[in-house]
Every structure is written in C-alpha cells, then in structure tokens.
Image: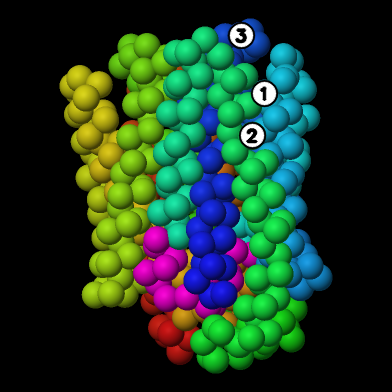
Amino acid sequence: MVHLLLVIIYLAFISLGLPDSLLGSAWPTMYQEFGVPVSYAGIISMIISAGTIVSSLQSDRLTKALGTGKVTAISVGMTAAALFGFSVTKSFWLLCLWAVPYGLGAGSVDAALNNYVALHYKSRHMSWLHCMWGVGAMTGPYVMGYALSGGSGWHGGYRYISLIQIALSAVLFFSLPLWNKNRSAGQTQAASEKSTEAAERRALSLARIIRIPGAKEVMLCFFCYCALESTVILWASSYLNIFKEVPAETAARFAGIFFIGITVGRALSGFITMKLSDTQMIRLGQTLIAAGVILMLIPGTPELTLISLACIGLGCAPVYPSIIHSTPTHFGADKSQAIIGVQMASAYVGICLMPPVFGLIANHITVALLPVYLLVILALMIAMHELLVKKTRREGIR
C-alpha cells in the first residue's frame, strides 16, 4: 500500500505542475485577443496567488479536519473546474473570476502534500516528487504550443489541461482509502508517525509562528525563490517574443526549456541528496541560478537565452524541495505543518507581487530588464538562507 500511495502522490505532484506554466505560455496571444496591456497578466497572477495565500494559511486546520487525501482530491477538482472555466472564457474579467477557485485549490494541497512527504519520506523522494511537478509544468507549454499551432487557440490549450486534471481528480478520489490504510497499518517509519502525532497535538497561531527563531528568514527565502521562479514562468515567453523577436508559438515552446531544466535537475538531485545535505543542495542551486541569469545578460541569439533558461531551471531544481524537506530539521516535526503553511503563504505573496511588479517594468520601461530583476531577487534569497542557517544553528534547532 505504501508504494501504491507513493504513485498516487506522484500523480498529485504532476497535477500541481500542469497549470502553473499555462498563463505565461499563452499570454502573448491572450492579451492581444482581450485587448488589454501586456502587464495585465500580473492581475490574473495576483488573484490566483491571493487565493493560494488564503488556503495555505488554512492548510493546517483543513488537513487536521479532512486529512491529506481529501484535501488533495478536493483541491485538484477545484483546479480542474477553474481551468475549464478559463477554456470557455471570452472576457478578461471573467478570467479574473475563474482565477479565484484556481488559487483556492492550489494552496492547501501544496502545503499538505509537502508536509506529508517531508515527514514520511527521505530527501531523495522530495526531489523526485517535485521532479513530477516539473513533468507537469514542462508538459503545459508544449500542450499550449500544440493548441496554438494546431488552430485550437489558447482556449484549446486550457481545455486539454482541464480534461487531464479532471481525470487525475477522479484517480485521487478513488484512492482516498489508501491514505487511511497507510496510516492505520503503520507502514510508514515509526519516527515519522510520532512526528505526525506530535504535530497534530499542537496548533500554532501566525503570530506565534513568526516569533520562532528562523521563521521570518525562511519565509523571506521562500518568498524570493518563488518570486524568481514565477517571474521566469510568467515572463520568459514574453521576453523571447518581445525582446528577442521570437514568434509567439515558438516562444511558448521555448519557455518549456526552463521546465526541462527543473525536471532533469530534480531527477538528478534525488541522487545527489544521498551525498549532500539540504543546505548544500540549496547553495548549489543558487550558484547555478546565478550562472544562468548572468548568461542571460550576455547579448546573443535566442538560442543563448534557451541555454540560460535551462541553467536557471537546473538551479531552481534542488532549492524548493530542499527548503521544504529541511523544515522539520530546522524547526522540529511538531511545528513543520504550521511552518510549511506559512512558507507556502509567503511563497504565494512573492508569486502574487513580484511578477506583476516586473509587468509594470516591462510595460513602462522594457522587458529586457528581466535578468537584472532576477539577480536582485536571487541576492536577497541567498542572504536570507544564510541567515536562516546561522540562526537555527545558534538556537540549537539544527
């Protein structure tokens, strides 16, 4: 049952990634059809992120009330419905309306699944599971590119992904008994079970969480990482289309290179974690991101930008899963669900604010400033991670 449940969790991580890259891939076509400025992609992104912030902050309560399995199945179902709504929408403001359930469906499942994996599985599984997110995220731009080049338009791209999400949601609902059997049969590690029980006994308020040594630093670190990743996801296609003058259909497919980098990187990271700690994995990733962004600053052909996007993707690969997996180590298993919930909320604040801020820069100055913007975010992320490591060591948490 443990192995079958792990397969279900893999599918859930694929479903998390599928919609994440659609808006960025489709936006060069969408904004022209709606007759709105290019920066309006930020409005959609902000609404989705606001929903995820709300649901992330409620993840601890929802998971305790419903269990990880039900939270996952319901959330994927909500996302599937929202994506179908996107596919039939012909108005920008209706798109904004459908973005609400889209966002609400994403937050709780992300926090619940990540905490479950952090408590019950080794670091390599966290990397490989997030590799499955990359498979989903990588698939999105290619599905959208296929729909755009095949005449179905961006509506068709969203429709195809919504149908996949509906099928995955059905699988998750049918798998609900596995979560209970796995828990009652005691097939997870004994230490993980005790950690989960301890976490369930203690509910922490937001104010109390923020006072924990290192909490503010990990929140800002996660804010910066997700701000950087989401900015690349949302604006890479537009950067290629507007600044590098790559056709919109080709730019949508080119943006998928970033997700190939993440996916391949996370597959490799699962093996590297057997030799390196979570902290070392994060530092390795930050170094590769810096190299990719610096390469992006060098004038050249669109192909050079593709190499830089692949390098940034490889660098992003170990950062997210390693920060999540290190949470019980930094803060203790009894606080991990609550900490991961606020980490997700701070991550979505970054997703909500930073891509729209760059949208304003692109709209009023130039989209060519994308690599400079990414470097500033990366510098703050590195500083916050180093402070987190020092503070938790000093407090004797690690």
Q: Position of residue 43 (x, y in %)?
A: 65, 29
Q: Position of residue 363 (x, y in %)?
A: 51, 18
Q: Main secondary structure of the magenta part?
A: helix
Look at the numbered disc 1 and give the secondary structure of its residue. helix
Q: Is 252 rendered above or below residue 127?
A: above
Q: How far apart are the alpha carbons under marks 1 and 2? A: 8 Å
Residue at screen point 26% across, 28% down: 305
Q: Which residue is mark 3?
A: 33
Q: Position of residue 326 (x, y in %)?
A: 45, 73
Q: Nearer the viewer, residue 185 or 326?
A: 185
Q: Residues within 10 Å of mark 1 (few under 14, many from 20)?
A: many
Q: Residues within 10 Å of mark 2 (few under 14, many from 20)?
A: many
Residue 162: mark in rendering: 2
Magenta region includes residue 113: yes
Mark 1 vs 2, N-terminal side? 1
Q: Is residue 290 left or right of residue 63?
A: left
Q: Nearer the viewer, residue 33 or 374?
A: 33
Q: Is residue 177 left or right of residue 147?
A: right
Residue at screen point 77% across, 22% down: 94
Q: Tell which tag, 3 or 2, sits nearer the viewer.
A: 2
Q: How far apart are the alpha carbons under marks 3 and 1? A: 14 Å
Q: Residues within 10 Å of mark 3 (few under 14, many from 20)?
A: few
**Answer yes or no: do the residues labelled 1 and 2 have beta carbons within 8 Å?**
yes
Q: Which residue is mark 1?
A: 87
